[in-house]
């Protein structure tokens, strides 16, 4: 039965231009969205931009522009990422939109009605770059760092509305205990639990010393804290508070994908806000790791920020997508380098998959005038290719349900390796020489079925390449009309279809 599935990415901060870290979360979310569609689920996939806050107000001021001008200018670079990376988001939300203002006002009011908001004064430290209030423990940690590694923090003393976060310490701990799948990977749940066990102080949720934000309802001297504002985008995107039908169909989100740096906002503050507002919590928050570049932290001052548009230009979107998800287990940190990409292209894409497709289609052109042959009786080795295909589908499905992209890709390439071995062992070229046409037909038929299954399974990861292979297999309907259940029926590529070998799918790169 089809279910609706709601996946989100963190909304990009428009103070920056896109880099591979941004591309990473979005690509991962896209693969989840596409895989769910393949499973027959109705998907809603949201991304967008985070446009308020002190940092943006200051940057705009130093550029001599208005904050909204800065946001309007930068947002395009993020919106265009969807085209460049083949991202299939259903909506793109900007926190400066009117619909979002209504949602933020509404959740603020609901929390106020629960008695969880009070007016007081915040006196303490603030990290403007990360738009984060610094707790005493964090302050001590920062001060113990060597000076050049300390984030810039400022002393703040101003009237502020507070959210009674302290009240949610026990409810949160209880929730984590009852829903261990809420924060993934598991080791991140331990971190979050330890943080909450350490004690929660009430959280300042408004500021008065600048104006670039959503005013507090009924007190426009205050703007709402940018994280409170930004997190609410996940509700706005599915119609909160006006479109009840859409909201009920999609909320709670199935998964919020986030980087490990912003897990606390998503796994502590956000669920507490929702509990207070009487709204269901997202089913899962998955925190991924961070990319370094050639061993170093990406930073503007080092000058090593990798532009995703450039990677796409050099390697293509599919290779980029494959690399990011295959290189490291989702959740762990990784290192980005051209040599690492090239090693994957040459070893796995060109040799493994590219070679299988091109030699198979080449043989069908040569021995059967490019027409997929009818199979004769299947032998044990043909059946074992079929069995392995079916078990691979099941494995990949389980691994994707766990958001273990690299495992899914390893399973797929393990199957590709087996099929290449089957080609070598059944030696169609020898069967052709012996004029054993029936056996030759059966073997080539078996190989194209395996390629058909692989093509459907790689489609969420590498949509352009999958489309190309699908066309070369001569399949009449577009690949995006196919479901995983179609791949389970051994025989998706029909005899009589005309194939085309075409040019190399993944040209090799020199190191
Ligand atoms: N605006 C906030 C999110 C608000 S969500 C309600 C934000 N934006 S961001 O633009 O700074 O980051 C967007 C995403 O990119 C985050 O998930 C972050 O973890 C991710 N990455 C930023 N740099 C990264 C790397 N170097 N490596 C991997 N991902 C990183 O945070």
Image: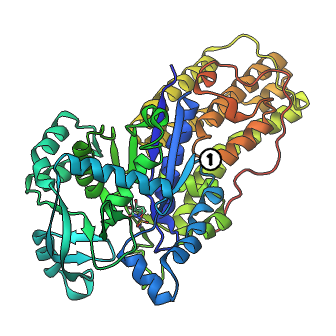
Residue at horizontal 11 percent and vertical 57 percent from the top = 200
Reply above or below: 217 against 395: below
Q: Please indicate, yes or no, whether residue 288 appears anywhere in the rendered image.
A: no
Q: How is the image coloured?
A: rainbow
Give the x, y percent position of residue 432: 83, 27
Quarter of the picture for ligand 1?
Answer: bottom left
Give the x, y percent position of residue 159: 18, 73
Q: Please indicate, yes or no, whether residue 497 appears anywhere in the rendered image.
A: yes
Reply above or below: 366 against 96: above
Residue at horizontal 46 percent and vertical 61 percent from the top = 95
The answer to which of 170 and 160 lies nearer the viewer is 160
Give the x, y percent position of residue 418: 57, 33
Residue at horizontal 28 percent and vertical 57 percent from the top = 265
Q: List the single residue furthest toward the front.
A: 218
Question: Which secondary structure, mark 1?
Answer: loop
Identify residue for label 1.
Answer: 462
The answer to which of 165 and 39 lies nearer the viewer is 165
Beta carbon of the mark 1 residue lies under 8 A of ligand 1 = no
Q: Is residue 190 left or right of residue 344?
A: left
Give the x, y percent position of residue 451: 67, 33
Query: Residue 338 falls in which quadrant of the image?
Result: bottom right
Count of residue discs? 1
The answer to which of 281 and 504 lies nearer the viewer is 281
Residue at horizontal 14 percent and vertical 81 percent from the top = 143
Q: Is residue 165 left or right of residue 18?
A: left
């Amino acid at each position: 039965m089809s279910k609706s599935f709601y996946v989100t990415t963190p909304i990009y901060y428009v103070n920056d231009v896109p880099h591979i870290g941004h591309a990473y979360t979005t690509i991962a979310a896209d693969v989840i969205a596409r895989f769910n569609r393949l499973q027959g689920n109705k998907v809603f996939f949201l991304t967008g931009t985070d446009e308020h806050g002190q940092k943006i107000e200051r940057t705009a001021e130093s550029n001599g522009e208005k904050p909204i001008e800065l946001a309007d200018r930068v947002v395009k670079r993020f919106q265009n990422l969807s085209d460049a990376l083949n991202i299939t988001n259903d909506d793109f939300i900007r926190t400066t939109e009117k619909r979002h203002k209504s949602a933020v006002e509404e959740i603020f009011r609901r929390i106020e009605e629960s008695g969880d908001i009070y007016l007081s004064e915040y006196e303490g430290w603030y990290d403007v770059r990360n738009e984060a209030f610094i707790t005493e423990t964090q302050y001590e940690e920062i001060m113990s760092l060597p000076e050049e590694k300390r984030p810039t923090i400022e002393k703040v003393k101003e009237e502020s509305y507070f959210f009674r976060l302290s009240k949610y310490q026990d409810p949160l701990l209880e929730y984590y205990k009852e829903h261990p799948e809420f924060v993934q990977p598991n080791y991140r749940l331990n971190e979050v639990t330890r943080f909450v066990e350490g004690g929660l102080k009430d959280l300042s949720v408004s500021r008065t010393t600048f104006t670039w934000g959503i005013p507090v309802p009924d007190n426009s001297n205050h703007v709402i804290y940018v994280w409170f504002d930004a997190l609410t985008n996940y509700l706005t995107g599915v119609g909160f508070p006006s479109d009840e039908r859409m909201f009920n169909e999609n909320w709670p989100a199935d998964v919020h994908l986030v980087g490990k740096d912003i897990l606390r906002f998503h796994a502590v503050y956000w669920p507490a806000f929702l509990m207070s507002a009487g709204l269901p919590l997202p089913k899962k928050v998955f925190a991924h790791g961070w990319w370094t570049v050639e061993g170093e932290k990406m930073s503007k001052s080092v000058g090593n920020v990798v532009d995703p548009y450039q990677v796409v230009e050099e390697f293509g979107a599919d290779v980029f997508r494959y690399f990011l998800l295959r290189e490291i287990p989702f959740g762990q940190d990784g290192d980005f380098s051209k040599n690492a990409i090239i090693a994957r292209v040459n070893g796995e894409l060109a040799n493994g998959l590219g070679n299988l497709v091109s030699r198979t289609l080449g043989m069908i052109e040569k021995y059967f005038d490019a027409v997929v042959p009818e199979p004769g009786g299947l032998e044990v080795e043909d059946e074992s290719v079929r069995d392995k295909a079916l078990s691979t589908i099941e494995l990949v499905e389980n691994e994707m349900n766990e958001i273990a992209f690299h495992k899914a890709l390893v399973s797929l390439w393990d199957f590709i390796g087996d099929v290449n071995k089957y080609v070598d062992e059944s030696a169609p070229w020898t069967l052709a020489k012996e004029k054993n046409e029936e056996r030759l037909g059966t073997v080539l038929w078996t190989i194209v079925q395996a390629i058909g299954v692989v093509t459907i399974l790689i489609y969420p990861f590498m949509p352009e390449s999958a489309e190309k292979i699908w066309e070369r297999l001569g399949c009449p309907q577009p690949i995006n009309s196919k479901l995983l259940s179609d791949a389970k029926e051994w025989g998706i590529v029909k005899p009589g279809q005309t194939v085309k070998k075409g040019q190399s799918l993944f040209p090799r790169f020199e190191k």
